[in-house]
Image: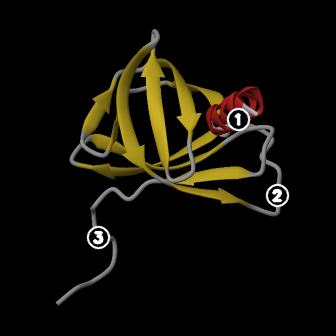
């Protein structure tokens, strides 16, 4: 009975680790996500349920909250959508090539009017 519990515990742990999907991203210019500046270069995105861990050279650069959305269309290539403010490019969305997954980041910048 103890052996069965250990196997089930291991199976659940393996499933929780497997739930994070990994993608590769190439930034052609410096970009900002949630206040953290990322230099141009190759990155790995570890997508979790409500966040994305951005890794470069096996070192975590930042973990940011993100809306992970599955859309009706498959993206042909990875595309990064920016918001430019005073020469800084803040990442707003990433459409992941070869998938139907879109990542949306809240930059904290209001784009609409306010009172």
Estimate the x, y position of residue 6 in percent, counting from the top left: 68, 28
Residue 94 in view in this figure: yes
Tell me the distance, in whole angstroms, between the alpha carbons under discs 2 and 1.
41 Å
Compare marks 1 and 3 and give the one earlier in the sequence: 1
- Residue at x 33%, y 56% (from the top left corner): 107
Taking the view exactly as shown, the residue that stands out farthest to the left is 115
Occupied quadrant, residue 30:
top left
Which residue is label 2 attached to?
Answer: 73
- Residue at x 68%, y 38% (from the top left corner): 12
Q: Along the horizontal axis of the image, is 102 left or right of 80?
A: right
Estimate the x, y position of residue 73 in percent, counting from the top left: 82, 58
Estimate the x, y position of residue 37 in percent, counting from the top left: 28, 31
- Residue at x 47%, y 53% (from the top left corner): 66
**Mark 2, secondary structure of its residue:** loop
**Mark 1, secondary structure of its residue:** helix
Q: Judge the density around disc 3: few (<14), some (14-19), many (≥20) Cα neighbours within 10 Å.
A: few
Give above or below for 20 relative to 107. Answer: above
């Amino acid at each position: 009975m103890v052996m069965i519990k250990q196997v089930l515990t291991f199976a659940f742990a393996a499933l929780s680790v497997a739930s994070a999907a990994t993608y590769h991203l190439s930034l052609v210019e410096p970009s900002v996500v949630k206040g953290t500046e990322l230099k141009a270069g190759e990155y790995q995105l570890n997508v979790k349920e409500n966040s994305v861990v951005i890794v470069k050279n096996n070192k975590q650069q930042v973990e940011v909250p993100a809306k992970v959305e599955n859309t009706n269309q498959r993206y042909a290539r990875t595309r990064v959508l920016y918001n430019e403010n005073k020469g800084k490019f803040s990442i707003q969305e990433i459409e992941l090539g070869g998938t139907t997954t879109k990542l949306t980041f809240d930059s904290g910048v209001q784009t609409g009017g306010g009172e």
